[in-house]
Image: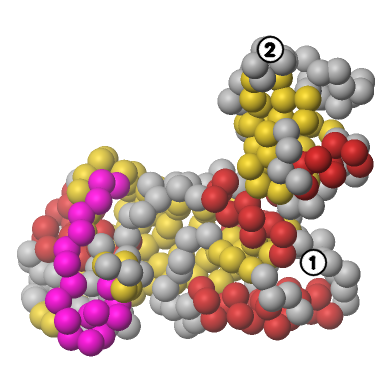
Amino acid sequence: MTVSGIIVLDKPRGIGSNRAMSRLKRLLGVRKMGFLGTLDPLASGVLPVFVGQATRLIPAFEGADKDYEVTLRLGEATDTYDADGTVLARADTAGLTPQSVQAAVESFSGEQRQVAPAYSAVKHAGVPAYTLARQGKPVPLRERTVRLRVGSVDCSALPEVRFAVHCSSGAYMRSLAHDIGRRLGVGGHVTALRRTRCGEWFSLAQSITLETLAERAARQDFAFLLNPAELLQDYRALIVEAAQEQALRQGRAIPLHPLAEGALPGAQAVAPLQKMKAIRSCGTLVAIGEVVAGQRGDLGFQPRRVLA
């Protein structure tokens, strides 16, 4: 059986994203996989894993906002900005109040500049920052603009703080924790991190643990695999037949008119540059692309990523 689709893995704490994916490869007997949005070993939660032909679709899902639940410990700063690092400084937190801490955390809502941690996967001249940091080499500071929306701050167990964050792609929760601690003048680092959502498509409600996946895969039950055609709701659907599918496999555009009745479900007309997905009558995805206009004004579907 050819295994293809998307798994929403509830990655456990204690292993990195690459190691989690390696376990999936062994469980499913699949060599071709890729994931969306790296999670550190300390973090758990939603890790979308693309399997088989579905790996070609990863770019269509990149750049999505994400949701996290963050646990921050104030009073200690570490070199990695999390509990896996070495403590660099300690400070007394007795003067902190729930009101002052909540105000500091909430002050990070909005658009702002953020520096990635030295121990991160951001590359400098092709070398991951964490490689340079582990070698004791200087890591160039690289700022990026991120958007954050902080909610549900719990300061009932100071110096530990729990809060939820909705953020743009590329935002680092470890950097946020470090910046909050610095603003309060006592330092801080992440002790627990859980991703609860990735984009509009993937959430904890859809997720599966490695243990449950292993049990179901042993029974040849692959119902946990999501059909990407059903997730790409903003792509207009085009139902294709065998001859059209063959043309798409060769990278050729196919005309949208004339089409068999029912090939373009819905009454709304298509327009150039509109995103489109070609699917078989059974619902499996063949290709994604866009509507293009020919020299005579006739419209066609140009595939950009073909799965078939």
Three-letter code for the amino acid on which mark 1 is drawn: Val
On the rendered structure, is 46 left or right of 103?
right
CA distance separating discs 1 and 2: 42 Å
Q: Which mark is residue 87?
A: none
Q: Residues within 10 Å of mark 1 (few under 14, many from 20)?
A: some
Span highlighted in magenta in the image: 129-146
Query: Is 137 in the magenta?
Result: yes
Front residue of 246 and 52: 246
Residue drawn at (44%, 78%), measured in percent from left and top?
41
Which percent across, then down, holds residue 144? 25, 51
Q: Which residue is mark 2?
A: 296
On the rendered structure, is 154 left or right of 36?
left
Which percent across, then down, holds residue 254? 77, 31
Q: Furthest residue to the top?
A: 296
**Looking at the image, residue 237 lies above or below residue 106:** above
Residue drawn at (76%, 46%), measured in percent from left and top?
250
Q: Furthest residue to the front?
A: 295
First in sequence: mark 1 or mark 2?
1
Q: Residues within 10 Å of mark 2 (few under 14, many from 20)?
A: few
Three-letter code for the amino acid on which mark 2 is drawn: Arg
Q: Which mark is residue 3?
A: 1
Q: Report which quarter residue 270 is drawn in.
A: top right
Residue drawn at (32%, 73%), measured in percent from left and top?
128
Front residue of 213 and 259: 259
Disc 2 on helix, strand or loop? loop
